[in-house]
Image (cartoon, grey):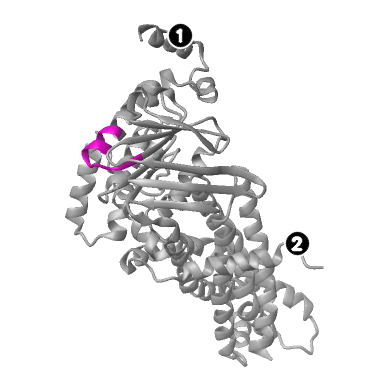
Amino acid sequence: MLPKGLFYHMGEYFILISKVFARPEKHKIYYRQFLKEVENLGVSSIGIVAIISTFMGAVITIQTAYNTENPLLPTYLIGVAARDSILLEFSSTMVALILAGKVGSSIASELGTMRVSEQIDAMEMMGVNSAGYLILPKILAAMFFNPILALVSMFVGIFGGWLVGTWVGVVTTEQYLYGIRYGLNSYYITYGIIKTIVFAYIITSVSAYYGYNVEGGSVEVGKSSTKAVVYSCVVILMFNLILTQLLLS
Amino acid sequence: MIELINVCKSFGDKVVLDNISVRFEMGKTNLIIGQSGSGKTVLLKSIVGLHEIDSGDIFYSDINFTKLDFKARKEIRKQIGMLFQGGALFDSNTVEENVRFPLDMFTNKTIEEKRERVNFCLKRVRLENVNDLYPSEISGGMKKRVAIARAIALNTKYLFCDEPNSGLDPMTSLVIDNLIKEITEEYSITTIVNTHDMNSVMEVGDKVVFIYEGKKTWEGTKDDIFHADNKYLNDFVFASPLSKKIKSLANGKK
């Protein structure tokens, strides 16, 4: 059975998105907001993405090594498996889920607080398209910068795999480097980037929807923040399946 | 001038505004008074279009606001300034950026011209050397004054104030009230203030409209209040022993 209100929320979401993509009042102001959001949503996430990617790369390498202890399997396959896991799934989907938590909750609580403190009403009163002014720069900034985060994640993840793999002795530098170059399909990177751009749009627009439409007070802001993260994650996982089928089949 | 004709608004089965007709004159401070929950804020938000009314008409000068599309309403809204209950200043912007916001969005002024206008507006509300402070770094009264400065930054023709004195001490309330009245008269603005502060009513109320359970039950000047025979108005205005004493003194003098 469909959850109650699903179509209502979908309708409201598309109405909001039509306002978001309406013609900006002043391109210069929107561009300035875009740069601010690149800093807020993108640059400030480099650290967390790098840390998580390093550890995940390391864990993937060790797990692959312990699962391929068969003497018939060449050791360089550890590098191949680590590379493919990171490029195909980890740096796009896993990083998107992590960013849904960090960026999604931040967007929902920021917009929710602006709603309950009447800051959004104040903008509307002035004749400003508040949805466009507040949300469009966030969506564009995430779609622009998240692919950079994905590339950072790919590089750092593979680096983390090498660092820990050689340190614990499950693979040598030569075997690992051979593995990550063996049969490399550059489309995997394109595939990861396409997914990242779609996920960036989902994270920012779904979270903005929940934040922008808050009614009530601080408790509702907290609840909307939680909903933003949960629904962003669910939609990301659904689109991950759809995109994987579309792009890899 | 703003005129409301037979304005009705309901939320579900609850009727919040019941056939309200009233005219607010230019250059005057018009007050809407009533108990909490009487429909004052809904009325104010309906006039500015933040709530869509169910029936009736709202005229800004000769323009029927209710019949306008979104784009045309935006043009009217550029002439409207609004002071919200909590100030509604943008937290992440400085005082200067807050006041400059409408100028950034709707004018092609240079940075210097905008700064000049911001400083003029801040000076007009008697605030100086606060340009670089954030809303969290200034007092409640200062926030209200910054909000007024922002409201008048674009030569405003209509000013709406929702509970401008909430959370302020009587002295600061007086400052805000007088500021609103001065600005209204100086720029010939049509000002509508929502309040249940009787000090404000007595200080600045050129015209007073009393709302009771969504209906307009009385209108007059601040001086008429003392002689009004409307039970609901008297119950509301003269609720405290002090105000009862003032009324008896006023009637005694008469």
Looking at the picture, does residue B27 appear above or below residue A137? Answer: above
Q: Nearer the viewer, residue A161 or B222?
A: B222
Amino acid type, mark 1:
Lys
Circle 1 packing at 10 Å, graded few (<14), some (14-19), many (20+), is few
Between disc 2 and disc 1, the foreground one is 1
Q: Secondary structure at mark 1?
A: helix
Q: Which residue is mark 2?
A: A4
**Residue A93 screen position, x and y as percent:** 63, 73
Q: Nearer the viewer, residue B221 or A131?
A: B221
Answer yes or no: do the residues labelled 2 and 1 have beta carbons within 8 Å? no
Circle 2 packing at 10 Å, graded few (<14), some (14-19), many (20+), is few
| Residue at image location 53% in from the left, 44% down from the top | B19
Amino acid type, mark 2:
Lys
**Is residue A33 found inside the magenta-colored segment of the image?**
no
| Residue at image location 65% in from the left, 82% down from the top | A243
| Residue at image location 71% in from the left, 62% down from the top | A5
**Residue A160 screen position, x and y as percent:** 59, 71
Q: Which residue is mark 1?
A: B245
In the displayed structure image, the side of residue A174 where residue B114 appears, left or right: left
Q: Secondary structure at mark 2?
A: loop
Let me know if residue A221 appears in the view: no
Looking at the picture, does residue B241 appear above or below residue B128? Answer: above
The segment highlighted magenta reads B181-191
